[in-house]
Structure formats: structure tokens, C-alpha cells
Amino acid sequence: MAGPIGTDDFSDVAIIVVAAGRGVRAGEGLPKQYRSVGGVNLLTLTLGNLARAAPGATLHAVIHPDDRELHDAAVAALPSEIRKSVVAPALGGATRQASAKAGLDHVATSDGRHIIVLIHDAARPFVEKSLISRAVSAARKYGAAVPGTMVSDTIKQVDAEDLVVATPPRANLRAVQTPQAFNFHLIHEAHARAAAAGVSDLTDDAAVAEWAGAKVHVFEGDPGNMKVTTPEDFARAEARLIADCPDMRVGQGYDVHAFCPGDHIWLGGLRIPHDRGLEGHSDADVLMHAITDAILGALADGDIGSHFPPSDARWKGAASDIFLRHAAGLVRARGGLIAHVDGTVICEAPKVGPHRDAIRARLADILSIDIGRVAVKATTSEKLGFTGRREGIAAMATATIRLPPGGKAAP
């Protein structure tokens, strides 16, 4: 994954992220841009790496009309400083060309400071700062530019009967990637003209610029800027994500809260009816507190009390998902992954078993990871100690995270 957010200025750059497709080649399930790679939503990963590579740029996703909740969940998983750069999404069209035009129209209605626009596929999550810098520089110099890589295989042109009719020289061929980079007004006008002329089958934005008469420059692409399309691509992407985060950390957390008068408790973000409540400064969600401390422990970044002091009135009665989202955001702000969390609840009552899967789903949602990476268990203390006497509830947790080399905090 890309590293911490840098200090370069891209304040006149808008990045359109085309995410309106259905991704049928990825197989059954959610559209591919909302599927998980190594426990991270693909669109979350792409937006995060774009923001780190181009600090100061605005990010404009173009989505299918049915996908607003999926988009919002992907954005919510980003660290807070990155979320600020993501504007409300545009709604895409029936083709990629129509969706790119919708994104350009969306940028045109913003604050008007954008001179350069990059148009990027949501399914290319491994975009690096060096590629973004080359793209912006090429757009400023040429007006229209695309990244391309040398072709290593011999290419054959065939006819309708699959007979070879030509063998183009490889030296003259390039495999074109995104982000494609343009002067904003040039590409916006080109798309408008193509749409007005009824031209709708152009497969990338460079082709739209070419149709409108612009000369398109090809700059150096990045062989690692892969596009995730098939199930095999998802496996390759996950392997790469893990390889990019070799610093594996394990943290542990422990919390306890005493019973008090009440008619429910909060456990793992779920409201569970009970003949008593739990006493605490916040909502006293003992499981979420333990998991939060486990993540902070893996980061070597204090504990829940140092981030959310109980002396601060803002946290009186606060929902504990605030604390857990904060801890997860700290991992992602460092370019890391949450690989797994494991929580154990210790109490005589209430029974956790009937609520286990709902708690796992809620925790997975808060952490923005797959439910298969969340374990929740429960046990009693055989009527020994304060939990055995039904005086309170305890919880233990471990969290496994992966960080890029060095594991330093973002500035």
C-alpha cells in the first residue's frame, strides 16, 4: 500500500474515480469495486492510495445509482483526513464513456479551481505517488496524456476468421493504463462534443480526446498498476497487499465493567436486553473497549483512555463505535490492514451465543473488514470471582494488524 500522506500540493487537480460498472467478470457477488481485498474494500483501497499520492486533490467517485450505500460505507472506512478530500459522488451512465462524462460534469459544478483532471479506474488500487506526479506533469505540458507500458508479447492482428493479417512492431505499441490525465476544459469539451454527436462506444478517455482532434501523449506507466478484474486478479491483489505490509503486529486488550441498574447492555455494538446495565463513562461496551485497546496495542499507540479520556465530558454516554472506528482509522492512516480480531466475553449472563453472529457482523461493519476476520467467543468463570458472582462482565481481545515497513505514524 502507499505510505503516509505527503506534503506536495495538488490543489488544482480533480481525480475522477470511475466506479459505476457491475464487474461481471469478477464472478457472483457485489460489484467488484466493493469487494474485499485482504480485508479492505477495493474502492476504499483505491481512494486511500489516490489521496496519499495526490494530497490536496479532490476525489470524485462516479457510481451506479443503486450503490450509494456501498459507496458511503467504503468512504466511511477511510481515515478522517482522507475523507475530507472525497466529495459527494456522481451517478454514472450505461457505458464507461457516459460515466466519465458524468464525472466531468460533476467536477464542473464544483468550486472551479480545477485545471487538471485525472480519470482513474476504481479497480486499479495500487496507484503510486510517482505515477500520479508523472500524470499531472504530462497533463500540464501536453494537455492530454496517458500512462503506457511496453508490450512484451508479440501482438497479432487477425481477421473475422482468426487469420493473421498483420504483426505490428512491438516498439510502437503500448498497454495503456489509468489515471489518464488532461487539461480539464479540453477533456470536458471533448466528451460534450462526442455525446452531442451520438458517439458513445469509445473505450477510454484518450480515445474521446483523439476523436475530438487532440494529440495524446504517452508517458511512462507502472507495471505494478494492475487492474483487478477476475477472481485470479483478486488473489494476486491480496498477495501483493500482504507483501506491501510485512510488519505484522499483535496487540491485546482487556476491559471490565460492573453491573448497575438497567434493562440492557451494549456488547460488540449490539443492544442486548438484560435485567441490569453496565456502569461506565461511555456506553460501557466492554467488548468494543477491549478490541479498541488491542488495536491500539498493536500500533504501540497508548490505550483507549489516552485517546478518549474519561475526564472529558464529550465521551459521557458516547457510543463505543466512535472509539473502535478511531482505532481502525489509525491503522489505515499508516497504510496498514486489520487482518483479524478475536474477542472473548467472560460472564455468567446474559448468554452471548444467540447474539454472536450479529455481534460479529456489527464489528466487521465498524472495522470495515470481512466478517470472516472477526471472532467472538464467550465463557463463564465457573461462578468464581466477580464475574462468577454476577457483579460485572469482562472481555479480552487480540488484534492482528499489518503495517508497511517501519510502521511509523502518519504526520
Image (spheres, helix red, strand yellow):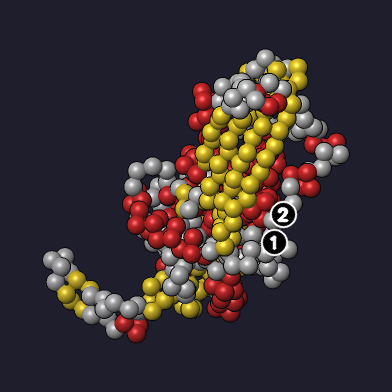
Please name the residue shown 79% across and 36% down the image.
315
Q: Identify the image quadrant of the C terminus.
A: bottom right
Q: Identify the image quadrant of the N terminus.
A: bottom right
Please name the residue shown 43% across and 65% down the image.
226
Q: What residue type is disc 2 on?
A: Asp
Q: Nearer the viewer, residue 183 or 120?
A: 120
Question: Is residue 336 positioned above or below 341 on the image?
Answer: below
User: Residue 110: x, y in percent?
Assistant: 66, 54
Q: What residue type is disc 1 on?
A: Ala
At mark 1, the secondary structure is loop
**Which is nearer the N-term, disc 2 or disc 1?**
2
Whole-angstrom CA distance, mark 2 to mark 1, is: 9 Å
Q: Are marks 2 and 1 in contact (CB under 8 Å)?
A: yes
Q: How many marks?
A: 2
At mark 2, the secondary structure is loop
Q: Please give the residue where the numbered disc 2 appears in the rendered image.
A: 301
Q: Quadrant of residue 210?
A: bottom left
Question: Is residue 282 positioned above or below 299 on the image?
Answer: above
Residue 185 in sight: no
Q: Please give the residue where the numbered disc 1 appears in the rendered image.
A: 409
Q: Nearer the viewer, residue 232 or 129?
A: 232
